[in-house]
Amino acid sequence: MKLDRPKIIVTGGAGFIGSHTVVALVENGFEPIIIDDFSNASHSVLDGLYKIIGRQIKCYEMNCCRAEQLEDILQKEGDIKGIIHFAAFKSVSESQQYPLKYYENNVLSLGSVLRVMNKLNIKHLVFSSSCTVYGEPDQVPVTESSSIKEAASVYGYTKQIGERMIGDTINASKGLQAVILRYFNPIGAHPSAHIGELPNGVPENLVPYITQTAIGLRKQLTVFGGDYPTPDGTAIRDYIHVMDLAMAHVKALDWLKRNDERQGIFNIGTGKGTSVMELLSSFERINQVKVNYQIGPRRPGDIEQIYAQCDKSNNVMDWEAHFTIEEALRDAWNWEKKFRESN
Ligand code: UFG
């Protein structure tokens, strides 16, 4: 069936960034189709999406590493305008413990996506990369041409490999075009609180750890390192509202459509660095809730500070972040409260 709304495959579309991107796609006239194996996502995400969008979004439960199955689905769907490839494992520490799990899943799934795109002549790819590819930067903010350092984790290395795989495949293909988005630190939730971040087990990332401590699920947050050479001694990151990040995928698809360039690489952040303690104080202030915390040792593998320079995504892709950190922290807290009330 030919649709007015361009069909976009969203691998990993039930995950944190994927699900918010599905909403942004629908709001901007696209028809997303989710492919997810639910290995790190809950089926309840689909209910949340239904509440926001007001109709069911098509979803295939499948692991993207299975190239033949992927090809069958895409062939059956037909008329696919692009693929946004989120499906990947994303835990830095787990990747050090189980490197093969990460190499197999992250590298194979991208390989399978690229193979099927070539075969079915699907031209547009948007790939989830990470600021982790910059390692510990010599200078902040980092631009897209800042040097790519040796990856500090297997996870980070799979993102570097992914970027390289895409470049090599584009060079050898006829019309494949790709946008690589280097995400900084996504936080927050959809303002409706119907979808949000739902980590499995003990959260590794800062904001879900804060919200789970604030709600009483965790006893105490440990701030990893109070002795960094930063103004308050804690590490600095570029925290971006997940809905702003989601919108970057819409802009990336638009850019691919109107552009002849084969590949675009863009930083997706706010351009502003925030320390762990600043973030924590903002959370307490905006939500009027106290978070029990202690300062602990640095976390191995963490870098001191990184934030983005986003001029290129602003000027070339016509994208910029609109939400404030306070809005992101309000949405993250509303999501946590709503989720715990109903579960
Ligand atoms: N932090 C704490 N306590 C916690 C959790 C985190 O103090 O319980 C600190 C970290 O040490 C770091 C900051 O909060 O200084 C942010 O940590 P996150 O784990 O939320 O995010 P990271 O910057 O470590 O990692 C993120 C993504 C990764 C990606 C990486 C690239 O989660 O997927 O950015 O830098 F690889």
Image (cartoon, rainbow, N blue to C red):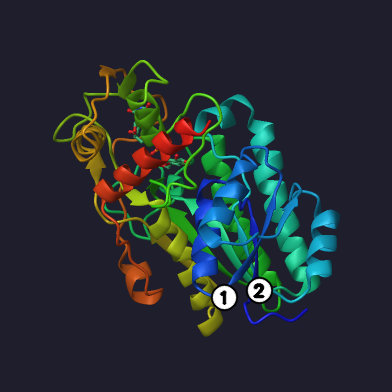
- The quarter of the image that holds ligand 1 is top left
Tell me: 169 left or right of 267. Answer: right
The residue at the far left in this view is: 231
| Between 137 and 120, the one nearer to me in the picture | 120
Neighbour class for label 2 at 10 Å: few (<14), some, many (≥20)? many
Determine contact: label 2, label 1, CB under 8 Å. Answer: yes
Task: Specify whether tag 1 is near ligand 1 (CB below 8 Å).
Answer: no
Image quadrant of residue 337?
A: top left
Number of marks present in the image shown: 2
- As displayed, is residue 172 above or below residue 93? below
Judging depth in this view, the residue of 54 and 12 nearest the camera is 54
Report if residue 183 is visible in the image.
yes
Mark closest to the chain's N terminus, 2 or 1: 2
Tag 2 residue: 176
Q: Which residue is drawn at 74% across and 51% down?
A: 64
- Which residue type carries mark 2? Leu
Q: Is mark 2 on a helix, strand or loop?
A: loop
Label number found at residue 262: 1
